[in-house]
Image (spheres, rainbow, N blue to C red):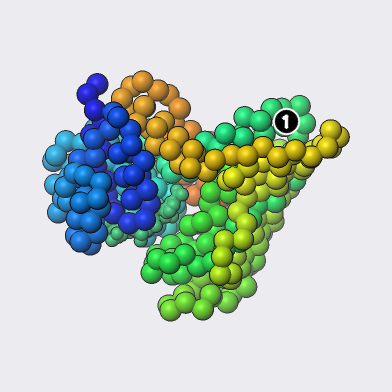
């Protein structure tokens, strides 16, 4: 295959990161970008190459080999539908939507079309995960605690529930995704939010949320999300098995067992590059290492929304296993 010709939908922070990573690859040509804010598209194209397109249809008419959808959570849906309709392989940034019905609709269309997809859960490419899996191979996980303790990110849509989905859906989803990958599927969630938004204009999200999780394999866990700080304090998870404690963050793994304590560094930037490399290789037909296709991200979306729903309703939410035929009944409220 000639160079992989990539187009971007959305020209904000994460699109710029993908543009930077992709234009460092010898076998990728960035053909351009479209954004509802044309000046953002022009700025990205000026910096990284390609041209600014007026809309998604115009971008697709230029014949990309792959499209990255890098829009905020509330804006997902129409761009994906157009890309799927054109039969073009698609990378979608997380979270895949602000709700479940959009994500399920897109997942169904992708499945019908048999389209190659990837979602930006790049933590799945952290170099230390093989070691985590090795350490856990012969002992079941007993408990996991995930956390994302941070500030309010500087994008206008973030503190609005109907725009971002809230901190659990928008941010802690990286941690929930890794929890699913390393511990297994959650069957029951009971969460609490504080009902107090962060001091940001128009905010209506909880500034802290905490959830208790029960897993299909008998493990139990917690997830905490907070945006009350002025800095990123901690994002990661701790896994406990018999005689083993693992602390995993984007920048490394701390292992403690009978042999003592050791730290294995990880490079977060390497994982961000790897997620793009794997997708491009899959598009070019020279690799098969997409770790989170859209259907897999749907499981993370379902879990994140279950936490958010439980925090809002004050009720326990039970998750039906993903294999159940009625996807839309995936989240049920347990009265
Ligand atoms: N995987 C990661 O590590 C990572 C990192 C940062 C952001 N993200 C995710 O990427 C998404 C975008 O975040 P961001 O920081 O780039 O936001 P941003 O606000 O900086 O950029 C979003 C861009 O999308 C544009 N846009 C909005 N609606 C659009 C539409 N319908 N069509 C085309 N363009 C549209 C906006 O004008 C804006 O330029 C979020 O869901 C966020 O969670 C992921």
| Apparent side of residue 122 relative to residue 32 in the rendered image (left or right) | right
* Residue lying at 53% horizontally and 75% vertically, measured from the top left: 198
| Apparent side of residue 287 relative to residue 190 in the rendered image (left or right) | left
Choose top left, top right, bottom left or bottom right for residue 22. top left
Ligand 1's quadrant? bottom left
| Apparent side of residue 159 relative to residue 53 in the rendered image (left or right) | right
Choose top left, top right, bottom left or bottom right for residue 72. bottom left
Position of the C terminus, as image quadrant, is bottom right
Q: Position of residue 117 (x, y in %)?
A: 37, 36
| Apparent side of residue 214 relative to residue 258 in the rendered image (left or right) | left
Count the numbered circles shown: 1
Is there any visible trace of residue 114 in the rendered image?
no
> What residue does disc 1 label?
135
Q: What element carries label 1?
A: helix
Mark 1 neighbour density, 10 Å: few (under 14) some (14–19) many (20 or more): some
Q: Quick one: 19 or 313, which is closer to the camera?
A: 19
Position of the N terminus, as image quadrant, is top left
Q: Is residue 217 above or below residue 188?
A: above
* Residue lying at 21% horizontally and 36% vertically, measured from the top left: 64
Q: Position of residue 98 (x, y in %)?
A: 42, 58
* Residue lying at 50% horizontally and 63% vertically, measured from the top left: 166
Q: Where is residue 164 in the image (x, y as percent from the top left)?
A: 43, 62
Is there any visible trace of residue 3 in the rendered image?
yes
Q: Position of residue 43 (x, y in %)?
A: 23, 56
* Residue lying at 72% horizontally and 30% vertically, measured from the top left: 135
**Is the CB of mark 1 within 8 Å of ligand 1?**
no
């Amino acid at each position: 295959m000639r160079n992989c010709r990539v187009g971007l939908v959305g020209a904000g922070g994460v699109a710029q990161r993908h543009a930077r990573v992709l234009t460092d690859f010898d076998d990728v040509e960035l053909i351009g970008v479209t954004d509802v804010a044309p000046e953002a598209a022009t700025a990205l194209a000026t910096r990284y190459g390609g041209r600014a397109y007026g809309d998604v249809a115009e971008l697709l008419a230029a014949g990309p080999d792959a499209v990255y959808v890098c829009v905020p959570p509330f804006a997902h849906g129409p761009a994906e539908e157009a890309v799927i309709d054109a039969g073009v392989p698609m990378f979608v940034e997380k979270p895949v939507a602000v709700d479940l019905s959009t994500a399920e609709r897109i997942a169904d269309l992708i499945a019908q079309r048999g389209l190659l997809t990837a979602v930006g859960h790049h933590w799945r490419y952290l170099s230390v995960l093989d070691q985590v899996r090795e350490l856990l191979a012969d002992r079941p996980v007993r408990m996991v605690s995930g956390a994302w303790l941070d500030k309010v990110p500087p994008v206008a849509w973030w503190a609005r529930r109907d725009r971002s989905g809230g901190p659990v859906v928008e941010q802690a989803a990286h941690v929930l995704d890794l929890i699913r990958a390393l511990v297994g599927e959650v069957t029951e969630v009971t969460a609490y939010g504080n009902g107090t938004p962060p001091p940001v204009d128009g905010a209506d999200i909880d500034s802290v949320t905490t959830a208790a999780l029960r897993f299909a394999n008998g493990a139990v866990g917690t997830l905490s999300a907070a945006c009350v700080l002025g800095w990123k304090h901690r994002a990661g998870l701790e896994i406990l098995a018999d005689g083993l404690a693992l602390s995993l963050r984007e920048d490394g793994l701390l292992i403690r067992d009978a042999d003592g304590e050791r730290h294995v560094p990880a490079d977060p930037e390497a994982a961000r590059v790897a997620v793009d490399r794997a997708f491009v290789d899959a598009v070019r037909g020279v690799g098969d290492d997409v770790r989170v296709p859209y259907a897999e991200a749907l499981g993370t979306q379902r879990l994140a929304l279950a936490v958010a729903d439980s925090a809002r309703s004050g009720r326990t939410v039970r998750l039906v296993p993903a294999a159940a035929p009625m996807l839309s009944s995936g989240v049920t409220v347990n009265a």
